[in-house]
Amino acid sequence: MDKALEGIKVLDFTRVLAGPFCTMMLADMGADVVKVERPGTGDDSRAFGPFVGNESAYFMCLNRNKRSIALDLKQEKDMEICKQLISSADVVVENFRPGTMEKLGLGYNELKKRHPQMVYAAVSGYGHTGPYYGRPAYDSIIQAVSGLMSITGHPGGSPTRVGASIADIVAGMYTAFGILAALHYRQITGIGQKVDVAMLDAVFSVLENAVTRYFVTGEVPQCIGNRHPSIAPFTAYKTKDDYIIIAVGNDRLWEAFCSAIGKEGLLKDERFSSNKKRSAQWESLDEILADILKEKPSQEWLELLERAGVPTAPINTIDKVVENPQIISRNMIVRTMHATVGQFLVPGVPVKLSQTPGKVEKAAPVLDEHRQEVLSDWLGLAEE
């Protein structure tokens, strides 16, 4: 095996982000992902900008390594083809509003009667059970209802959406994880199962210690800007010319930090002698450090702190990130060749496997690009 998921066939009914992110992860690791799209328009995200020629860059960055076939599931002939493809699949993935696949006769309870070995994955806003079953959702809706927006932003400011569509992305990751767990179980038992992932559950599970802090203290977590709620100093500071992030995660680093900035006297200040005390006195500490860090430009501070082993970084804009030598050295920017737009750059595969590394081998497909080869490869149909 050259690829970790070689031989796994995934029939992908997903669109936009959460589902396509999941199936992209599977495709990167070698699964044969066939994307089922609406004739004429395809995945909704094919209409999202920016565009390269007539092709959506949004769509292309999420659907590499996949093949596309267009099927009208309201037409009997196309539905029959769809059912045959399902019969050949190891995994079916969908992210419709709950109930949609059931209306088509393709819900899990129906399919498992004929295909008990199938892994069926569904990712949706609120999941396939509970009082919110069937409610529509987008990333910003879930960021709001999950509580994430309430702890993002600066004190006194308005609730703030995280810059990336994190609810979709985290749900997509969890769905891929669930699929792999279900495939492992099937390998042992021969029995498939349903993977039900809700975006709300996914975001709630990654609120870090906000939920725990509430249960322990009874205090409702609020927006606190860039600082950490229980570690100090651990925030962004304005230097002479820009901003940098400094993360002093323990008392040993506090000693190294004070030495690096030439303020060993802070080590004798009883208010800051432990992380617990520094966190309680973070406002006083921030005032002191803000005055100190304004004295030198960012690059000078970064060099001093890095030499001392103190975690620190510039706050990069995207144009700087894509030129970052660490990003480049780990092959996190990959060139693909698209059928109509030519060369197109996409993020690389972040999971580095030593024996069966993931690869970006193909650009995102043009709508219905692989009809002939999919029907041949999966169903053994002759060209005619």
Image (tube, rainbow, N blue to C red):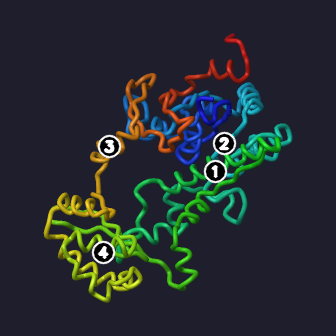
Q: Residue at x 43, y 31 (%)?
A: 55
* Kind of residue at badge 2: Val
Furthest residue toward bottom: 270
Q: Which residue is drawn at 39% across and 25% down?
A: 341
Local SS, label 4? helix
The residue identified by callout 2 is: 93
Closer to the camera: disc 4 or disc 3? Answer: 4
Q: What's the distance in space between the residues labelled 2 and 4, CA to CA?
A: 51 Å
Q: Name the side, left or right, on which 353 lies relative to 326.
A: right
Q: Upstream in the sequence, badge 3 or badge 1?
A: 1
The residue identified by callout 3 is: 322
Classify 10 Å Cα crowding around label 3: few (below 14), some (14-19), many (20 and above): some
Q: Upstream in the sequence, badge 4 or badge 1?
A: 1
* Kind of residue at badge 4: Glu
* Kind of residue at badge 1: Val
Residue 244 at what x, y percent from top left? 26, 63
Q: Answer yes or no: is residue 258 visible.
A: yes
Q: What's the distance in space between the residues labelled 4 and 3, CA to CA?
A: 34 Å
Residue 236 at what x, y percent from top left? 29, 67
Classify 10 Å Cα crowding around label 1: few (below 14), some (14-19), many (20 and above): many
- Residue 255: mark in rendering: 4
The residue identified by callout 1 is: 123
Closer to the camera: disc 2 or disc 4? Answer: 4
Q: Residue at x 66, y 63 (%)?
A: 132
Classify 10 Å Cα crowding around label 2: few (below 14), some (14-19), many (20 and above): many
* Kind of residue at badge 3: Val
Q: Answer yes or no: is residue 36 visible.
A: no
